[in-house]
Amino acid sequence: MQKSVTPANSSAGSKDNIRLFTTDHPDIPVPNKERIQYLDILRGIAILFILTANIRYLSGEYFIPEVQKAAMKTASLDYIMEILAFIFVDGKFYSVFSILFGIGFAVQYQRMIKDDRVFVPFFRKRMLGLLIIGSVHLFLIWLGDILTLYALVGFTLVWFRHFSDKRLLIWAGILLLMPVVHWLAMYLTDTFYPRYFFRLHNQLVAPYIMDMTGENNNPEFSIAGYLAISDVKQLLEANLLMPLRRLGGILMEGRMFKVLALFLLGIYAGRKILENNILSNTSRLKKIILWGLGIGIPMNLLRTWVEYGSLEGAFWQFAEYMLNALALTPLAVAYCAMIALIVTRRPTWLAWFGPVGRTALSNYLFQSLICIFIFYGVGLGYAGTLGYSGILLVAWVLFGWQIVFSTFWLRHFRFGPVEWIWRQLTYGKLIKLRE
């Protein structure tokens, strides 16, 4: 078993290389001393900001009528925070998480090749396990699940494992623009086929909302009505149909293209981490930051103007898709490089994100469950009662609890609880949870 990962073109004694790896958490198939501290920290930070994005939907805040929002005491602060989040957070950290997924693929592939193991069957089992976990989340808990899409797209990654770096970047660039091409094709042919899934969803789910509200005339699906469901059985029955709405949204956005593009960027980044020691190349990291911010911030400011400018018509819809392609990824890449630079120079500053990152899958799913308990009718029923600043406070308190819980958990267990289940599904055998 290897004691550390040493990129081919770097010194085996490099202090910069050694300090980017943790040594206190055995993992399978990745040995204890090969865990990259930077990836755990970046994953933990991504989990925080994914929560700040998702909680708008889980809390019902996103669906509060504008008139009601304007009447809240925190309305001015809510609006400022919402704009800032749209510029700097919205879409960026699920992009970071997608890049991390690709990095993980590259790391696993290189390590398994070294160990002469058969990678493709292993990775397919891994994706099948993730698909099972994601499907439980999607069909029983929350329609905003991303794991199912990750697993389905992830199955295709084995086709790209032998691509050169140049081919990976070319394919990533093409795929990032595919949502724009996809929308244009739907517009020019007037075949917005994802609407079929929205209509079907509304027809099938409306009766559950109708029964709850007592509205018997022309029932329509209502998010407010859905969040207010107080009967667990009724909520679960409605949840089984909610993926139709999710499918319509994914197809309309062309998100599958973007996710695959980010996976490929992650594979490229993973190779650079393992083979070129890029995490210690501060000059390269600074250039990535400057380019990412230089492109990302202006594009995101323009994207915000389009989004909040009440601009209507096909041209502005096209502009929105184009800006999504140009704005989100550069800023996400800049964030990755900024955090790498901090971890390289001051490895202890962000270390408290590490435990959350090492149990990221568990924390992601627990966020859904806890928010459902706080906001849904089956729980405390606070949906639609807090403005954006209020739900941000809830998110930060929840994440603070997750830092404490994750740190405590990892003192006693090798993996997060859901990570442990994922390993059982991948390896088909019992793996010890405790040391």
Image (tube, grey):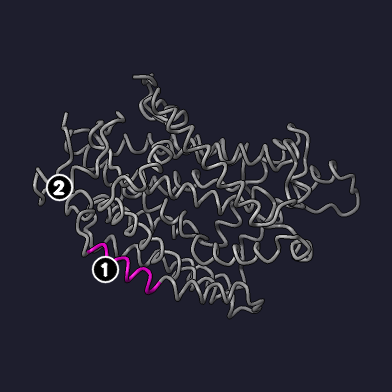
User: Is residue 86 visible in the rendered structure shown here?
Assistant: yes
Residue 252 shows which numbered tag? none
Q: Residue at x 27, y 65 (%)?
A: 286
Q: Inspect the image, locate mark 1, and give the three-letter code of the amino acid beneath it.
A: Lys
Alpha-carbon neighbours of circle 2 within 10 Å: few (<14), some, or many (≥20)? some
Q: Residue at x 11, y 50 (%)?
A: 10
User: What percent of the width, then of the height, locates residue 290?
Assistant: 32, 70
Q: Residue at x 30, y 42 (%)?
A: 37
User: What percent of the width, then of the height, locates residue 30?
Assistant: 27, 34
From the viewer's perspective, is residue 254 above or below residue 385? below
Q: Inspect the image, locate mark 2, and give the three-letter code of the amino acid beneath it.
A: Pro
**Residue where numbered disc 2 is placed:** 7
- Residue 190 is inside the magenta segment: no
Image quarter in which the N terminus is found: top left
Viewed as shown, does residue 106 lie left or right of 70? left
CA–CA distance in space, label 2 to label 1: 22 Å
**Residue where numbered disc 1 is placed:** 287
Q: Residue at x 66, y 76 (%)?
A: 310
Magenta residue span? 284-295
- Disc with the residue nearer the chain's start (2 vs 1): 2
Mark 2, secondary structure of its residue: loop
Quadrant for residue 53, please give it.
bottom right
